[in-house]
Image: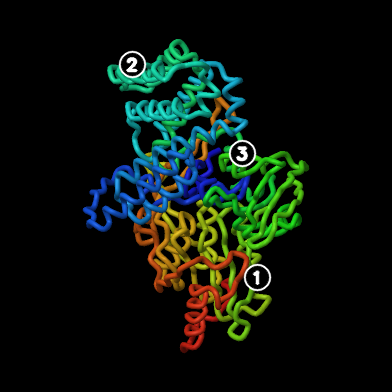
Amino acid sequence: MQHRVFLPRRLDPILARRTFLSLLLLIVVGAWLSGERSVAVEPARLASSQLIEVGDLLRQGRQFEVEDRWDEALAHYEKAIRSFPNEPSLKRRFEFSRMHFDVRRRLADQSYCRSLEQLSLDKALSVYEEVLVRIQTHHVDAPSWRELVEQGMNNLDVALSEPVFVEHNLHRCSRERIDNFRRETRRELGQRSMRTREDVRAAVEWVARAAQRDLGISPIAVVLEFNCGATNSLDAYSAFLTPDQLNEVYSQIEGNFVGLGVELRTEDGRLTIVRVIPRSPAEYAGLRAGDCILSIDGRDVSALPMEQAANLLQGEAGTLVALSVASPGQPPRSLRAERRRVDVPSIDEVKIVDSLHGIGYLRLACFQKSTPRDLDDALWTLHRRGMRGGVIVDLRGNPGGLLIAAVEAVDRFVESGVIVSTRGRDVREGQTYSAQADGTWRVPLIVLIDKDSASAAEIFAGAIRDHQRGAVIGQQSYGKGSVQGIFPLHSHASGIRLTTARFYSPLGRSYCQVGVTPDRIVQTVAKPVASTVDPAGDPTLATALDFARQTISRPNPVTQTRVR
């Protein structure tokens, strides 16, 4: 079954920034990573001061690379690319860092390691061929077979320089032998025909057998590196999914997972809790936003790669994990938490923020299977509490989710007309989603967005804007314009995520690298604390409340609640 999703990014940088462990593998990277390969962007000429700034950014990033801090290198280059989206040197370093991070992430994934042990060469090649078929059939752009092989070889090159890969696959192999293998392999691949899918499979099989003969590497490991290189290089959102990652994506769609229920960020080598999911094991254990995790089951987090440290928090339901944590300004404390199923609400805050005027507020954190039902429950809750002057829907930081959930959420507020349209290389990917009149809320609406509002969040905000159904307030959104499909593989218990289509607003506008422009722009220095809803410390929310009050004071405001 193919799920159509708006996932802002592949699985690799999740630990470089934020993640709900075992679930929310949704992390946004620079707007240039849009998957829009068909559009050539002319590099802009930079002023001398900007060239100096780019040089400083490259030097800082290289320092992370030299120290093997690939997660921090990813986060650094991502932030830099947001400032200089057309700078090719930053893009190259990002991709290089991503490949290193990929290798380490894969080899820290037990399901991937089991695949290395259990697959035969023929089976691994069958997996690779099935991936090629999926790419040929479903990807939004027609594949270049030679480019896919070259990207696979680039991936293998990086793996051969990664200590963790060498430790797993190479034993007493000199650097000279490895370099000779690289040169000879690239020379051979350059001479081979790459006109068909069969040519590609034959070329990769040749590389795998040559690596086994010359370096003693498992040919299965080589084929899987080519597999990951092919899918991960297609665009910013396509990726090979290990068995565990595939299960995590399905958990994300369903809105539940097994774990502790914390959202993490890595900064300066520290694993910091950004948010604790309500009623989760983490909350019951006493973990709080802002806590820094120092050790996990006795292992010092600072001595581990961040992805490995975060993986230690995962485990089977019912198992315990021992943590040492420190709150800001407080001495370390020890605690134990039990891993169990966590239900993640797509709406995590519902309240009346102005009782005098009857203004409601809800924070929509992501779009998952339960979102339409959660939204209905939230709106009726606000209605019972006295909502009459309007509702503020907060999409700040919302990274996306299921396409159909976004469509159904918009349908709660828009009575008729197009919500979003999609277009792909496969004509079956071209669809138009429209609103239905039944069950539409007519309460005045304000939508909050920021630079991290992406994908499905942009679908929601863009539809409200194009239909002039309400006001959009905040910052320019992220600017993602593509749809991904999740494809489980028949030849193995893994899967792939492929960009299958691009999406457009009701007025036909592309969101790619543009996003949604607010009706009122509010510049903020720092994000408000996630667990609070306080206009005094949140300029965007304060602006929204002022706007709502002004709307109420106008003659003949819309006060109907719902169309039956």
How far across and how far down the image is residue 172, in percent? Answer: 50, 16
- Assess whether mark 1 and mark 2 are in contact (beta carbons under 8 angstroms): no
**Quadrant of image for the N terminus:** top right
Residue at screen point 42% across, 66% down: 475
Q: Is residue 461 left or right of residue 278?
A: left
Q: Which mark is residue 247?
A: 3
How far across and how far down the image is residue 506, in percent? Answer: 39, 61
Residue 488 appears in the rendering: no
- State the SS at label 1: helix
Q: Residues within 10 Å of mark 3 (few under 14, many from 20)?
A: some
Amino acid type of the residue tagged 2 in the rendering = Glu
Which residue does the numbered mark 2 point to in the structure image? 184
Counting residues from the start of the chain, the first of labels 3 and 2 encountered is 2
How far across and how far down the image is residue 222, in percent? Answer: 47, 22
- Report the Cα–Cα distance between label 1 and label 3: 33 Å
Which residue does the numbered mark 1 point to in the structure image? 380
Q: Is residue 325 left or right of residue 302?
A: right
Residue at screen point 61% across, 63% down: 375
3 vs 2, front mark: 2
Amino acid type of the residue tagged 3 in the rendering = Asn
Question: Residue 150 sits in which quadrant?
Answer: top left
Counting residues from the start of the chain, the first of labels 2 and 1 encountered is 2
